[in-house]
C-alpha cells in the first residue's frame, strides 16, 4: 500500500461499474474530481447479478481489514431484472430475492465501520430498440425491458428508504433528458459519456447535501500535500506564489457551473 493513506471510495457492481473508466465514464470522472483527495477503487464484474455479489462480498469487503472504505457506491439490478430463460440459465434473479440480496449487501457494508458511507444506484433505463440492434445476434431472445428496469429500480429505492441508505434514482434521472434514448448509451445498456455525466451529477448532489462527517464532496476534502510552498508557481506580483493544489478551475467549470444546477 502506498501512502499517505487517503479516503477510499469503492465502486462495486456489474458492468456499469466495470466499464466506468471507459468512454469518459463516471468512474474516470470521479477519479479526476478526487485527484489528491481520495482513491477510487473499481470492483466491477460485467454480467454479474446480486447473487454473485453476495458470494464474494466478504472477499471484496473483509470486516477484519485494517482500513475500511469511506464510501461505497453499489450498483446491481440490471442483470437481475432480465427475464428468466426457459433453460434456467442466465442472470435473472426474482424480485423478492433481489431485494433480500441487496439488503444483505447493505447490512454487510454498514457493519464495516461507523464511518463507511453508502450510496446505492438504482437500475437505469435502457434503449430496447438499440439492444435489439446490437445484441440480437448474440442472445437467444430479447430479455430486457425498460418496464422491468423500472420495477427493480423502484424496489431498490424502497429498500434504501427502509434501511436509511442514500440512493440515486437512475431510472428517472436519465430519462429527464429529452434525448436520453439517443445519447445516454453505447449499446442500449451501457452508459455513454453523456449518461455518465448524469450519474456524476446525481452522486455530487448526494455528497453535497449529505450531513456526513466528514463531508465527502470533492470540494470539502483537503488536497494531499497542499501546503503553500516557495516552489509553487510565481504570481504576477513577482513576490508570492500560487498554490494550485486544489486544481479546481476546470472542475468548477464542468461540474459546479454547468452540471451542478
Image (cartoon, rainbow, N blue to C red):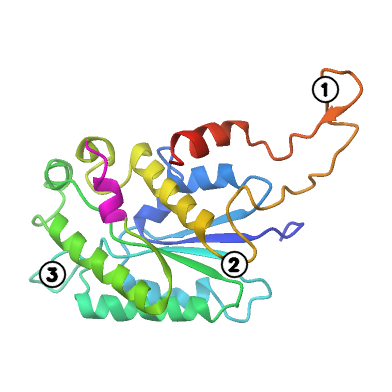
Q: Classify 10 Å Cα crowding around label 3: few (below 14), some (14-19), many (20 and above).
A: some
Q: Do the CB atoms of the residues marked 3 and 1 lie less than 8 Å apart? A: no
Horizontal side, residue 70 vs residue 131: left or right: right
**Label 3, label 1: how far apart the Cα atoms are:** 64 Å
> Is 176 part of what is drawn in magenta?
yes
* Residue 114 in the image, given as x and y percentages of width and height: 60, 77
| Residue in the image at 22% along x and 80% along y | 96
Residue 79 drawn at (x, y percent): 25, 63
Query: Which quarter of the rendering shows the C terminus?
Result: top left
Q: Residue 173: which numbered mark, if any?
A: none
For marks 3 and 1 on the same chain, the one whose residue lies earlier in the sequence: 3
Q: Nearer the viewer, residue 223 or 237?
A: 237
Residue linked to disc 2: 69
Q: Is residue 173 visible in the rendered structure shown here? A: yes
Mark 2 or mark 3: name the one nearer the start of the chain: 2
Whether 112 is drawn above or below 258: the answer is: below
Q: Position of residue 233 (x, y in %)?
A: 81, 26
Q: What main secondary structure does the magenta stretch of the protein show?
A: helix
Residue drawn at (50%, 76%) of the image: 109
Badge 3 element:
loop
Crowd class of label 1 (few under 14; some 14 to 19; many from 20; radius 10 Å)? few
Q: Quadrant of residue 243?
A: top right
Where residue 235 is drawn, which disc sits there?
Answer: 1
Which sits in the foreground, 16 or 227? 227
Magenta extent: 170-178
Q: Is residue 145 magenta?
A: no
Q: Residue at x 25, y 80 (%)?
A: 97
Amino acid at each position: 500500500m502506498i501512502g499517505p493513506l487517503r479516503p477510499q471510495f469503492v465502486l462495486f457492481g456489474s458492468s456499469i461499474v466495470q466499464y466506468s473508466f471507459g468512454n469518459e465514464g463516471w468512474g474516470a470522472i470521479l477519479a479526476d474530481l478526487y485527484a489528491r483527495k481520495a482513491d477510487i477503487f473499481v470492483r466491477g464484474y460485467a454480467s454479474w447479478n446480486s447473487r454473485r455479489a453476495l458470494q464474494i462480498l466478504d472477499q471484496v469487503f473483509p470486516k477484519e481489514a485494517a482500513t475500511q472504505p469511506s464510501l461505497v457506491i453499489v450498483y446491481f439490478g440490471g442483470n437481475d431484472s432480465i427475464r428468466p430463460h426457459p433453460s434456467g440459465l442466465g442472470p435473472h434473479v426474482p424480485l423478492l430475492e433481489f431485494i433480500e440480496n441487496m439488503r444483505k449487501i447493505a447490512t454487510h457494508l454498514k457493519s464495516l465501520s461507523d464511518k463507511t458511507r453508502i450510496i446505492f444506484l438504482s437500475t437505469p433505463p435502457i434503449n430496447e430498440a438499440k439492444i435489439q440492434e446490437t445484441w440480437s445476434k448474440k442472445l437467444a431472445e430479447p430479455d430486457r425491458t425498460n418496464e422491468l428496469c423500472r420495477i427493480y429500480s423502484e424496489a431498490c429505492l424502497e429498500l434504501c428508504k427502509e434501511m436509511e441508505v442514500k440512493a440515486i434514482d437512475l431510472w428517472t434521472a436519465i430519462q429527464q433528458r429529452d434525448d436520453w434514448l439517443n445519447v445516454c448509451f453505447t449499446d442500449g445498456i451501457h452508459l455513454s459519456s453523456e449518461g455518465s455525466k448524469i450519474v456524476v451529477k446525481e452522486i455530487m448532489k448526494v455528497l453535497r447535501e449529505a450531513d456526513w462527517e466528514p463531508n465527502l464532496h470533492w470540494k470539502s476534502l483537503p488536497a494531499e500535500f497542499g501546503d503553500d510552498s516557495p516552489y509553487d508557481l510565481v504570481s504576477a506580483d513577482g513576490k508570492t506564489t500560487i498554490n494550485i493544489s486544489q486544481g479546481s478551475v476546470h472542475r468548477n467549470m464542468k461540474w459546479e457551473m454547468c452540471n451542478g444546477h
